[in-house]
Image: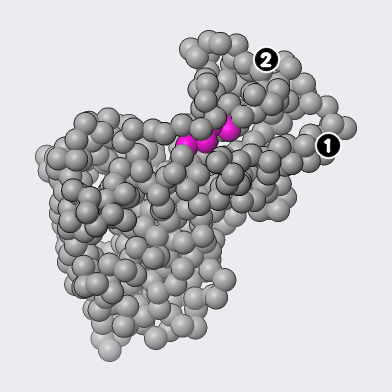
Amino acid sequence: MTGKAKKTLIIGLDGVPYGLLKELADHNIMPNFKDLRKEGIFKIMKSTIPEVSAVSWSSIITGKNPGEHGVFGFTDILDGSYILSFHNSLKLKAPPFWQINERKRYIIVNLPATYPAQKINGILITGFVSPDLEKAVYPKPYVETLRKMGYQIDIDVERAKLSSLILFKQLYETLELRLKVCMKLMDEIMWDVTMIVFTGTDRLEHFLWNAYEDKNHGQHQNFLDYFKAIDNAIGKISSRLDEEDNLIILSDHGMEKIDVNVNISTYLAEKGYLKIEDNPKKGYNSIKRETKAFALDPSRIYLNKNGKYPRGSVNKNEEQKLIQDLTDLFYELTWHGRKVIKKVYRKEEIYHGNYLENAPDLVLLPERGFNLRARLFHKEIFEMEEGLTGKHTQEDAFLYVKGPEAYEVVPNNLSVENVLTVIWALGV
């Protein structure tokens, strides 16, 4: 032992399910992770509900329930309006770990839902969604450094839809730059904690999950090769650690094949609970007073409450019956004889904290294969979507912690809200 303070490296693999990582390690496609598994604990982990990155990464970095950190999706409705608002870091109501212990020095690279970049003792480069590099970096002098390196925050999803060739070209370019930037910072800055998130894994799985499952698919080997590149990146970054340093690798949610998209707004409209003007330009401002409930992506149901929304029609004494009626309604939804909804949660069942009032009144957890959407102006409840074959899952994220002490600090019934407790227990 050198007597110096331990460093901690946290590597995020966005959207990677436990089963996928286990299989690729077992088959030696990810040999670095295969070797690491022998030195620590590798467990399945539950994500948030809904299982979207803005919510789950917020819980990971704060150690809090959504009712405590105030993030329930990538979008929300502004108070007293029907105006759709996108998530940003200013809406996070609980401090991330780098603000809790400001004595440590941090490198945070490509962490989703942290835009715009806020003050940090170290450097923060935000991840998806970050529309402006200038506001995605703290401190500002690093903006020019990243520009000169050609740094990219994310792939161009619309271009990637054009062909697999374009998709893989972008995936490798962003991976190479991400790795190059992270290793440069780790070499040049005195740091205590580095956290880097690779989001290309999520993008690949959304586009080509079918290529992973189907060994005869034309892109199957390319899918595996990309994960080999991810494994190589894990090996390169973790080689910067000393034996006594901490290493954590994790995902924010899992992934599975889409059988069909389910437009829950269309279902609400067909059943008479949602009434809208046929004017897509107005967005949620097209909601009429007769509306009893509306949905936000991917699976959040809000009562159109009198006093909360401009054309709210649901009075307090109606709420409980309406919630029960909607619960029954969604349990009745089937596709080719298959149940669509596995569980309908009331907000009090899954959320707690000072921001419970802002939570959706109901959240839907789908059965396997059903991709829930809340598109207002779609005519069909069930649709297939060109270009996307993978969807998020809630019950099969993962956590890996290196070292014998991992068995003492990682709980059995593990969720993303436990990650920060694990980090603190390692002495970070």
Residue type, numbered disc 1: Lys
Circle 1 crowding by C-alpha within 10 Å: few under 14, some 14–19, many from 20: few
Q: Is residue 210 above or below residue 417?
A: above
Residue matched to label 1 = 321
Q: Residue at x 43, y 56 (%)?
A: 254
- Indicate the position of residue 297 as horizontal and vertical percent values: 52, 35
Q: Residue at x 25, y 79 (%)?
A: 35
Q: Secondary structure at mark 2?
A: loop
- Foreground of the two, 115 or 388: 388
**Where does the magenta region start and end?**
261-265
Q: Quadrant of the N terminus?
A: bottom left
Mark 1 or mark 2, earlier in chain: 2
Q: Taken as a whole, is the magenta stretch helix, strand or loop?
A: strand
Residue type, numbered disc 2: Lys
Which residue is situated farthest in the left direction here? 148
Q: Quadrant of the C terminus?
A: bottom left
Q: Secondary structure at mark 1?
A: helix
Q: How many marks?
A: 2
Q: Find out whether residue 141 is within the magenta segment.
A: no
Q: In the rendered structure, find residue 288 and report the number of the disc placed on it.
A: 2
